[in-house]
Image (cartoon, helix red, strand yellow):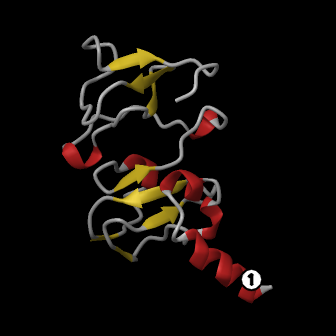
Amino acid sequence: QEALLTLARRQAEALSDEAAAEVGALFPQWEPGRDYQAGARVSDEAGRLYRVVQDHTSQAGWPLAGTPALYTPLGVTAEDPDAIPEWVQPAGAHDAYNTGDIVDYNGTLYQSLVDGNVWEPGTYTGVWEVYTHAEQP
């Protein structure tokens, strides 16, 4: 059984971000005090998957969902609306929103219409649109 789990974890590493997010529990769970390399994928306690943005040593005060300069959520879908992250002001190009990204902003879901989106939803036309679950991202 342990060998099967090890095999599944190794195979999960080769998956696209979207496919990997469906099996987030197969990835290492985030822990404080660990060295993380940019590009690595790590899960939270609920199995939601994140990509590490920059090399760092994790700290208890730097949670996955609260530090967009360090972690980007992956695999957010309309089928799992609880996984849709709240909009956070990007710090730069490394954590800007891309076309198709969905965020919760003040209780309304928005979908990014452009890559490199650093604008607050509702501020400018043509960069965000209100997202409804009936639409496909």
Residue at image x 36%, y 69%? 58
Q: Residue furthest right?
A: 1
Which quadrant of the view contains residue 119? top left
Relative horizontal placement of residue 109, taking residue 51 as reference (left or right): right
Residue at image x 58%, y 37%? 77
Residue at image x 42%, y 34%? 101
Which quadrant of the view contains residue 71? bottom left
- Most foreground residue, 114 or 105: 114
Q: What quarter of the picture does the N terminus occupy?
A: bottom right
How far from the left and from the top, in percent, is residue 5?
71, 79
Q: Is residue 2 above or below residue 62?
A: below
Q: Residue furthest left?
A: 92
Which quadrant of the view contains residue 23? bottom right
Relative horizontal placement of residue 68, taking residue 23 as reference (left or right): left
How far from the left and from the top, in percent, is residue 107?
51, 20
Residue where numbered disc 1 is placed: 4
How far from the left and from the top, in percent, is residue 91?
21, 43
Tag count in the figure? Answer: 1
- Most foreground residue, 14 or 21: 14
Relative horizontal placement of residue 52, taking residue 15 as reference (left or right): left
Q: Amino acid at mark 1?
A: Leu
How far from the left and from the top, in percent, is residue 8?
67, 75
Q: Is residue 47 above or below residue 124?
A: below
- Most foreground residue, 56 or 63: 56
Q: Is residue 67 above or below residue 116?
A: below
Relative horizontal placement of residue 112, taking residue 123 as reference (left or right): right
Q: How crowded is the residue under tag 1: few (<14 C-alpha within 10 Å), some, or many (20+)? A: few
Secondary structure type for disc 1: helix
